[in-house]
Amino acid sequence: MVPTDLRRASLNTATVKHATLAEACEVAAATGFGAVGPWRDRVQEVGAAGAARIIADAGLVASSLCRGGFLTARDDGGIAAALDENARAFEEAATIGAPELIFVVGGLPAMSAPGAGPRRDAEPADRDLVAARARVADRLADLVPIARDHGVRIVLEPLHPLFAADRAVISTLGQALDLAEPFAPEEVGVVVDTYHVWWDPALREQIERAGRARRIASYQVCDWILPLAAEPLNSRGHVGDGYIDFATVSGWVCDAGYTGYVETEIFNEEIWSAPPEATAATVLSRYENHVHPHLDGGPARGL
Amino acid sequence: MVPTDLRRASLNTATVKHATLAEACEVAAATGFGAVGPWRDRVQEVGAAGAARIIADAGLVASSLCRGGFLTARDDGGIAAALDENARAFEEAATIGAPELIFVVGGLPAMSAPGAGPRRDAEPADRDLVAARARVADRLADLVPIARDHGVRIVLEPLHPLFAADRAVISTLGQALDLAEPFAPEEVGVVVDTYHVWWDPALREQIERAGRARRIASYQVCDWILPLAAEPLNSRGHVGDGYIDFATVSGWVCDAGYTGYVETEIFNEEIWSAPPEATAATVLSRYENHVHPHLDGGPARGL
């Protein structure tokens, strides 16, 4: 007895980190999700063709593939490696039927030779953010034709400024849209991930802009909770447990015309240690209560 | 034998957290700083008039007073308390001769009655960021006439988005400038604190805008280091130890016409446990090597 059609909800496999792709799909389908958002490690374990069968056999679709990117290398070897790795990821996305590959663009380039201590290991090869961002734009120009050949859209994910040094030199939706602008909307889109963008004073206008440009490729949800975890990367909470105003942000995303899947992607040691069935049930119930009513109040459109 | 005039450097007393104001001033003067940026707790320990004497006797000036603000309360009691507290802070600033009071504007309003666990304690009374920001604007309108009567400028400090939930709903320099715009430049300024704004893709243009509007009231420096400390608030590093490109940002601040003091404000348990003399020497040397050459290459102007 599912009161509303919640098949617009997608379970990102990182939320049930310890489940195989088959286990994650089984749980997602049994709980009532319409899609999964797989990570590449779980796809590679069974091969892309095998992953495609697992997802289809569960009656699901892949809402996206996580993830490509890491485009800030300065040296020829690093640049070539990034292009190769992303080409493989496009192929996997195409094989599993994921229309989009999420890109985390990378942080300041790391030292090639790590130093003595943990802090020195993290020392950047250079601190030139402006140049690192320019290299992201150059790599996008390299990769768009390859993605197009695979029928896959590149989706830029701005990450919270907390991760600007070591993970993504793109921190705002506006910045992602600026980088996407030279390309067609079906070539480069953006993801609105509440965890990363909720604080942005320009969020409403940039979501509107993304909608007008037909570039909203994914809406991802999880909550900002405090205190931060010892590993800040794994500090995300279930929707409703933290500070984010999901009614408002979901309403903006809806008003911008987004009708696609809503992925819940949570990195959190405590949630990872829970049984996948329990996590999936909580995720879907939070989606139903905090997100779904503010999207369009009804069943999925155009999926 | 000080090779260049480094008296443009100011030692924020939070950087030598365990020193009294007298100890901090003695160390700052002996090291070669031209100013200190005191926190209110250290001023209140000796009274504002006493603090004024201590600073003057050391041959220093107060470059600013930290800090006022915390303006996001929703209830009448909380609003009245914020106005009273800030009025006291203006009076202290005027008494110690600090031309500016730094404002940290506050996070989402806290629950009035704390709940069971640490996470519940942090739960916001509401999650309406847009409304919280509007209340900041309302309180600024209340406080500007009071600050003017004291001859003190309110200085808005955007905080890193890491602190948007619990400490400051102003996260970017652009947002601070928008809030300042209804008021005269001598009434409301902004501080450029590298730790908080280094990641901002709009940083260069917003520093230029702040300069054109004659609103840059303070330039504060410290570095973004990784991994984050267990208490992220105390995760700042000495200039040069982390990811921030001080040459570039200092050049932008210089080009925007800023000729005032440069405060080093570091929250870091390890640095706090070092002798104040050693910390002050490191701070001044890092200022000399990483910041001063990119400001105007010469002695302080107009101080």
Image: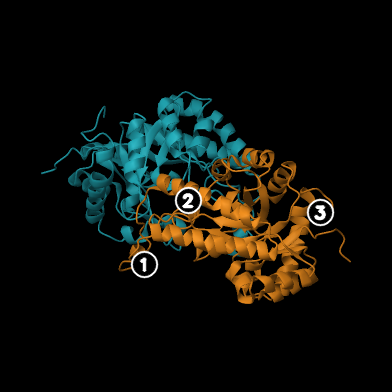
Chain colours: A orange, B cyan
The reply, left or right, for residue B6 in relation to residue B248 is left
User: Looking at the image, which is closer to me, B152 or A295?
Assistant: A295
Please tell me the numbered disc located at residue A300: 3
Residue extending farthest to the right is A1
Q: Tell me which residue sits at (54%, 48%) in the image.
A: B164
- How packed mark 3 is, by other alpha carbons closer than 10 Å (few <14, some 14-19, many 20 or more), is some
- How packed mark 1 is, by other alpha carbons closer than 10 Å (few <14, some 14-19, many 20 or more), is few
User: Looking at the image, which is closer to me, B271 or B87?
Assistant: B271
Read off the chain for label 2: A
For marks 3 and 2, the one nearer the N-term is 2
Which numbered disc, 1 or 3, marks the residue closer to the eye? 3
- How packed mark 2 is, by other alpha carbons closer than 10 Å (few <14, some 14-19, many 20 or more), is many
User: Looking at the image, which is closer to me, B206 or B259?
Assistant: B206
Find disc 1 in the rendering and name its residue.
A118
User: Looking at the image, which is closer to me, B190 or A292?
Assistant: A292
For marks 1 and 3, the one nearer the N-term is 1
The reply, left or right, for residue B258 in relation to residue B149 is left
Q: Amino acid at mark 1?
A: Pro
Q: Tell me which residue sits at (22%, 51%) in the image.
A: B281
